[in-house]
C-alpha cells in the first residue's frame, strides 16, 4: 500500500485508508503522513509565519490524526477537511496563547479585500496594518458560532459551502453569521479607535 500514488486518491480512497489507520495500521498512516505533511506545512506557515513553529504544528496535527483517528467519519467530511480543521484549531490555540506577540498575523491575513464589503476595505487595508493581537481581541467578543465561521472564511480562505459542510449548517446560515460578525467587528474596531 505504501507505494501508491496518493495524488489521485478520491474521498472514498482516503476513507478506506483511514479505516486502516483506525486499526493502527502504520503503513496506511504513512500514506496520510506523506500526502498531507507538505500541504499542512504550507497551510500552517500561512498562519504562524515561522517555519519552525509551522513544522511543530504539522507534527502535532498528524499526531492528533493518529491518536484520534476513531473520531474521523468519512460520511460527514472528507479527510482533508478533517485534517485541516485539526491543524487550524491547533494554530488558533497556539496563536491565542501568544496573543501578546504581534508578529504573526496582519490585517491582510484576516481580511482579504475581496471578502470585505466595499465600505470596510478602507478600515482593513494592509496599510492600516491592524495587528492580529487586536483582531483576536475582537474575535473573542463574537459568539462562538459566529467566531468559528469568521475564522474559517477569513483566516482559512475556505469557500462558504465548505464551511457550511464542515459545521453541518445551511449555506444561508454561514452567510448571515458572517454578516452579523462583520458588523460586530466593525463596531468594536471603531469604538476602539475613539
Image (cartoon, grey):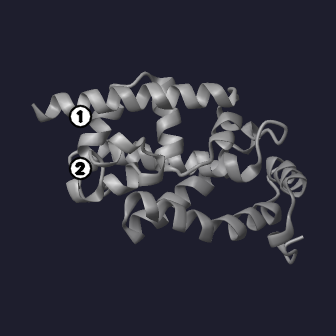
Judge left or right: residue 58 versus residue 20.
Answer: left
Quadrant location, the C terminus = top left
Q: Left or right: 5 with respect to 64?
A: right
Give above or below for 53 relative to 81: below
In the displayed image of the protein, which residue is found farthest to the left?
Answer: 194
Q: Are marks 1 and 2 in contact (CB under 8 Å)?
A: yes
**Label 1: which secondary element:** helix
- Find disc 2 in the rendering and name its residue: 130
Q: Closer to the camera, 96 or 132?
A: 132
In percent of the image, x 67 and y 31: which residue is there?
171
- Residue 9 lies, in percent from the top left, at 85, 64
Is residue 122 left or right of 72 when viewed as pictured?
left
Looking at the picture, tell me which residue is in the foreground, 6 or 52. 6
Task: Report how far apart the C-alphas of labels 1 and 2 lie in the structure.
Answer: 10 Å
At 45% from the left and 62% from the top, the residue drawn is 46
Residue 143 position in % (x across, y down): 43, 21
Instruction: Return the x and y of residue 32 as percentages of the image width and height.
Output: 74, 62
Give the left or right position of residue 115, taking residue 173 as reference.
left
Let me know if residue 164 appears in the view: yes
Q: Is residue 161 above or below residue 182?
A: below
Above or below: residue 41 compared with residue 24: below
Amino acid at each position: 500500500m505504501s507505494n501508491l500514488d496518493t495524488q489521485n486518491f478520491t474521498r472514498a480512497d482516503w476513507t478506506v485508508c483511514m479505516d486502516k489507520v483506525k486499526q493502527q495500521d502504520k503503513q496506511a498512516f504513512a500514506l496520510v503522513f506523506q500526502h498531507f505533511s507538505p500541504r499542512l506545512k504550507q497551510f500552517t506557515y500561512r498562519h504562524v509565519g515561522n517555519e519552525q513553529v509551522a513544522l511543530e504544528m504539522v507534527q502535532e496535527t498528524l499526531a492528533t490524526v493518529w491518536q484520534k483517528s476513531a473520531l474521523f467519519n468519512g460520511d460527514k467530511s472528507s479527510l482533508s477537511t478533517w485534517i485541516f480543521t485539526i491543524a487550524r484549531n491547533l494554530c488558533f490555540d497556539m496563536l491565542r496563547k501568544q496573543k501578546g506577540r504581534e508578529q504573526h498575523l496582519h490585517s491582510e491575513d484576516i481580511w482579504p479585500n475581496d471578502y470585505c464589503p466595499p465600505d470596510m476595505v478602507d478600515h482593513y487595508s494592509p496599510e492600516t496594518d491592524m495587528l492580529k493581537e487586536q483582531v483576536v481581541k475582537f474575535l473573542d467578543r463574537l459568539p462562538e458560532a459566529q467566531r468559528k465561521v469568521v475564522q474559517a472564511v477569513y483566516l482559512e480562505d475556505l469557500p462558504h459551502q465548505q464551511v457550511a459542510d464542515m459545521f453541518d449548517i445551511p449555506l444561508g446560515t454561514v452567510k448571515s453569521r458572517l454578516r452579523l460578525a462583520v458588523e460586530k467587528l466593525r463596531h468594536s474596531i471603531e469604538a476602539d479607535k475613539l
